[in-house]
Amino acid sequence: MADIIQLLPESIANQIAAGEVVQRPASAVKELMENSLDAGATSITLIVKEGGKLLIQVIDNGCGMSETDARMSLERHATSKIRKAEDLFALRTMGFRGEALASIAAVSQLEMKTRLADRELGTRLVVEASEVKIQEPVACEKGTSIVVKNLFFNVPARRNFLKSTAVEMKHVMDEFQRLALAFPSVAFTLFQGDEKVYDLAPGKLSHRIVNLFGKNFESQLIPCKEETEYVRITGYVGKPEFARKTRGEQFFFVNQRFIRSNYLHHAVMSAFEGLLPEQSYPFYVLFLELDPKHIDVNVHPTKTEIKFDDERMVYNIMRAAVRQALGVHHLAPSLDFGVDVNLVSKLQSRGQSAHEVFIEERFQTSGKQQWRELFPEDLSPRVPESLRKDEPAVVEPEKDKPSILGNSTVFQVANRFIVQASSNGLLIIDQQAAHERILFEKFQLAMRQRKGESQQVLFPQTITWSAGDCALITEMMPELEALGFRLEPFGKNTFLITGMPPGLRETSGKDLLEGTLEQFKNQSDLSLPVADRLARALARRSCIKSGTALQTEEMQVLVQQLMRCKTPQYSPSGQMTFFHLEEEKIAAYFNRS
Ligand code: ADP
Ligand code: MG
């Protein structure tokens, strides 16, 4: 039989390759804009018609191309960005495959105008389905402008596969946003038809975020920063109360390249643990910078996946960075604990939260007695002895942190809110959310330490469960004991409750356990560890509810305990626990400053 294998003509090979690189208008947008960035542009304009199906134009003020390069740029595997295989491991550019322009040109009608800075005339190229129709000199601006018309005009199957203009436009916007976020120092403009959708001036990342997503993001951003030898993490996370039910505003960039990573997402989510309502997603824009030799971006042609050589390390650093941001920068009013003021610098050098350093130091130097002072055990109406009245009133560990006036009057509003003066304003505390937070952290700590202090019950009650609940309870027994419950088997599916967690208001162990189990079962976020879910459930069940009248001492203790929490500003389910009304805000009500 005769030989039958032939090499494909270049134009067909390009068309096939295009299938991988260019799935839809948005992919072309991404490739063109990345080329502009690689060309060092400081200003990029994108014009899109009909979601990019009719027209995509990218205009940049980058380095431009010579006549020959302009022609070469359309060849497959033609790139100025790498020359040898090793270069792949030192990539600093967005592109490197040399496929994008060739692919786009294979499936569209493309026009390019480009000029080098030091040339008077530029080059104009008109290409249709890989075929160069015109190449001629042209007067044009420095930089490059590429128009892509009628994408997939010669591949009807693909063309028909495109979605509505609205859907395609959404994809285009996504790509635009990612690049605009990754390069805040570059000016970006987006026109949808004749309408200017974005006009983004170069500036700081925070400004870029606000310009892209709206003014209400201004007060929602918590800066995040962490640096190790392996990786540097910078960016912002949104405050927990700002979390949305839908995903979409979560961005990771590795060396300025947008990537998707469920793994890293999980790291961030675990840092938010105990701060978010169930099934909601916090905003974040996080940049990872690391030596390109640690990553492999060559996993997929569209390059949104990435491999790290040490994934676990990245995970841990990411988690710590976000945790730290939420704990430290996310300012809670601070109390004076008689700790030295250098605390903040110490914690920064050690990468711990102020709270952790503080606790650690207290614990080491003064042992158990003072440990109790930190966590007065109960909230019963009598003032715990541990609560010294003569605590020094105010200290400001950091200038911009409000501090509580220790001795100021506390009062309750509507049996719901606690009001106390701070050094520069008023603190308004939601008693239920606050107490839920306090108890949650206390229970977590108890379970971690497995101390299991318990309060003996005077009249033990029996409790009978269904077989299923009984299995659940038996499984959670170690955690329940650590919390202070004492349950003794008492016949089939029945227990005798002989001990309870100390310091709770609820006096019926039966009600408490039943209520807690109910809460526990109702949680939909089953991904959390059992201990955590139990701590949440018990805190929710046993916290002081709205509508409960409180005595002055109870309020004082509550406020102090709250401020000593690791994450005082939110309840475990992400509700705000307090609100700080600063002097300026009050003055603003009176139109004064
Ligand atoms: P890659 O970006 O992977 O190198 P492309 O096909 O996207 O491959 O581009 C091919 C080459 O064309 C680039 O390496 C670059 O030299 C040149 N090029 C493309 N777009 C531009 C631009 N906007 N400005 C200057 N040069 C460009
Ligand atoms: Mg490219």
Image (spheres, helix red, strand yellow):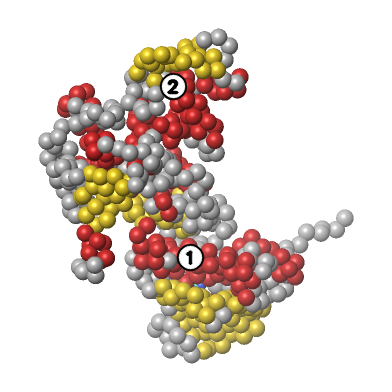
Quadrant in which the N terminus is drawn: bottom right
Seen in the picture, residue 239 relative to 53 is either above or below; the reply is: above
Q: Nearer the viewer, residue 538 or 400?
A: 538
Cα distance in 3D space between marks 2 and 1: 54 Å
- Residue occupying image coordinates x 41% and y 73%: 200
Tally the marks: 2
Q: Which mark is residue 192?
A: none
Seen in the picture, residue 378 relative to 10 is either above or below; the reply is: above
- Residue occupying image coordinates x 35% and y 60%: 219
Instruction: Name the residue type under label 1.
Output: Gln
Please indicate, yes or no, whether residue 249 appears anywhere in the rendered image. Answer: yes
- Residue occupying image coordinates x 16% and y 42%: 407
Q: Which mark is residue 509?
A: 2
Q: Which mark is residue 177?
A: 1
Q: Earlier in the sequence, mark 2 or mark 1?
A: 1
Quadrant in which the C terminus is drawn: bottom left
Seen in the picture, residue 156 relative to 407 is either above or below; the reply is: below
Specify the farthest residue to the right: 1
